[in-house]
């Protein structure tokens, strides 16, 4: 065994193929690695010794980090615009997108547990070099679109709460994001708790707003019937899916689980995976509820069917904040702004972390977080500095993310269906089929958007 190189994951001792049977599948080598962890994760036996409750809680957390990306400021923009323009008609899109997200994130978590590798590392190992490099380039471009939504959203939140001009607010967001990321260097648990705390603020903010505003149960249920009111609704649906099924956290989730717990055999892997399934259900379930609250609140207050006067044309986060303040009260507007700020700060930290995972996995390189943060935040600072429409920029960034989903999803499906990669945790046929259907639906939607754009 050799010590990890400068581009390797800290805490994992590298096992080379030359030191093992060269014919052995990568999974066996990766499993050997998973047992040798330098304090990054406890053994399953040690976690069991903490008791049933504390031990279970210690196994939860990665999905909450991933869930933050599913309620980032891009979701605010797409969900509020969907509710204001189409009422409850696109409720089904949010529900479908969240169910897709649960399966996608579960597969990503399983990839890490089964192989002790993250998805970018597996792509580098198993895919042709040009394909792997191409995936890395597009992942970096998608990271910029991700940061655009997160930075702009947090800047708008600071502006609404404290009146900070948008450009300085963007710089302040970067500073706070570095602080949250610094917690990860002191142990993954502190980072997860900080992110979960910020997610809690978002959840409580919208729970307060929903209780204050109220909602039509009949309208919400009617929105479960799949329909597109017009062609613009298709574009917005793509934005909702792009804001919900996030490409960068497909990569990240596998990195969060790959060396979290040291396991000795397949039975222990299955036990860890059961907790990861519960983690995904709780974390992504909470994100789905938040997204649904956003659309329902907008439909209840701002849509034509709500009967609101003077606020039916809500087309920006600032207008949504103002509408909440005038129609409901200052408390509702404050809860909205606080949730937006917490969302932007937490998701920007997660986005930077995901960027490091992508670069390290695909090309075995790392760059300082400050440099990465500076590069990926440039588009957002341009938007803020030029005074471009923030909400329109957010929606556009989410459509870009929708186009990036297949580039993460298709390789993951291809790899998780292979027994030589996943070992005993290889996908069942029905799982592969379900994931493939999701990929086909997303790709088909993207193709339609290109056709509609060219036809228009």
Image (cartoon, rainbow, N blue to C red):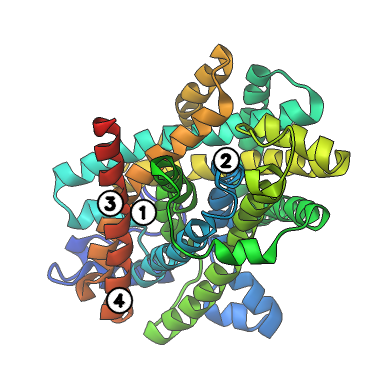
Other-residue count near label 2 (Cα within 10 Å), few / some / many at <14 / 14–19 / ≥20: many
In front of the other: 299 or 239: 299
**C-beta proximity under 8 Å, tags 2 and 3:** no
Q: Name the residue furthest right.
A: 330
192 relative position to 355: left or right: right
Any part of residue 51 in sight: no
Q: Quadrant where the N terminus lies?
A: bottom left
**C-beta proximity under 8 Å, tags 2 and 1:** no
Q: Look at mark 4 in the image and give the residue it sits on.
A: 427
Residues at marks 2 and 1, CA–CA distance in whole angstroms: 51 Å
In front of the other: 109 or 85: 85
- Whichever of callouts 1 and 4 sits on the residue coming sooner in the sequence is 1
Q: Position of residue 448 (x, y in %)?
A: 28, 45
Quarter of the view holding residue 284 = bottom right
Any part of residue 119 in sight: yes
Q: Secondary structure at mark 3?
A: helix
At 22% from the left edge and 76% from the top edge, which residue is drawn? 419
At 64% from the left edge and 78% from the top edge, which residue is drawn? 55
26 relative position to 281: left or right: left
Q: Look at mark 1 in the image and give the residue it sits on.
A: 3
- Whichever of callouts 2 and 3 sits on the residue coming sooner in the sequence is 2
**Relative vertical location of residue 264 with respect to residue 442 in this rendering, above or below:** below
Q: Look at mark 2 in the image and give the residue it sits on.
A: 81
Q: Look at mark 3 in the image and give the residue it sits on.
A: 443
- Whichever of callouts 2 and 1 sits on the residue coming sooner in the sequence is 1
Quarter of the view holding residue 172 = top right
């Amino acid at each position: 065994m050799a010590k990890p190189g400068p581009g390797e994951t800290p805490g994992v001792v590298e096992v080379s193929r030359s030191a093992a049977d060269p014919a052995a599948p990568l999974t066996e080598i990766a499993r050997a690695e998973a047992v040798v962890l330098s304090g990054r994760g406890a053994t399953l036996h040690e976690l069991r010794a903490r008791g049933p409750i504390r031990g279970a809680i210690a196994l939860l957390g990665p999905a909450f980090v991933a869930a933050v990306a599913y309620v980032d400021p891009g979701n605010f923009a797409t969900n509020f615009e969907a509710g204001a323009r189409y009422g409850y008609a696109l409720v089904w899109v949010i529900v479908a997108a969240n169910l897709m997200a649960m399966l996608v994130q579960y597969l990503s978590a399983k990839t890490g547990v089964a192989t002790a590798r993250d998805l970018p590392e597996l792509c580098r190992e198993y895919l042709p070099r040009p394909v792997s490099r191409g995936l890395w380039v597009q992942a970096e471009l998608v990271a910029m679109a991700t940061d655009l939504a997160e930075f702009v959203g947090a800047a708008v939140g600071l502006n609404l709460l404290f009146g900070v001009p948008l450009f300085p607010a963007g710089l302040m967001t970067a500073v706070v994001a570095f602080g949250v990321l610094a917690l990860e260097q002191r142990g993954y648990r502190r980072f997860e708790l900080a992110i979960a705390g910020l997610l809690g603020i978002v959840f409580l903010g919208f729970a307060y707003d929903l209780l204050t505003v109220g909602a039509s149960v009949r309208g919400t249920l009617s929105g479960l019937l799949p329909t597109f009111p017009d062609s613009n609704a298709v574009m917005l649906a793509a934005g909702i899916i792009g804001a919900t099924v996030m490409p960068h956290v497909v990569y990240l989730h596998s990195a969060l689980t790959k060396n979290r717990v040291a396991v000795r055999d397949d039975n222990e892997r299955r036990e860890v995976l059961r907790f990861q399934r519960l983690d995904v259900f709780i974390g992504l379930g909470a994100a789905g509820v938040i997204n649904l609250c956003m659309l329902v609140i907008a439909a209840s207050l701002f849509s034509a069917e709500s009967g609101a006067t003077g606020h039916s044309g809500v087309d920006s986060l600032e207008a949504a904040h103002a509408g909440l303040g005038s129609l409901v009260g200052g408390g509702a507007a404050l809860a909205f702004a606080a949730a937006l700020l917490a969302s932007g700060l937490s998701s920007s930290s997660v986005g930077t972390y995901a960027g490091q995972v992508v670069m390290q996995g695909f090309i075995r390189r790392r760059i300082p977080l400050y440099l990465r943060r500076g590069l990926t935040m440039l588009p957002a600072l341009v938007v803020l500095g030029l005074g471009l429409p923030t909400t329109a920029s957010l929606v556009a960034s989410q459509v870009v993310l929708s186009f990036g989903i297949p580039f993460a999803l298709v390789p993951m499906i291809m790899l998780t269906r292979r027994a030589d990669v996943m070992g005993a945790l290889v996908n069942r046929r029905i799982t592969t089929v379900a994931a493939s259907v999701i990929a086909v639906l997303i790709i088909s939607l993207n193709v339609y958007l290109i056709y509609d754009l060219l036809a228009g």
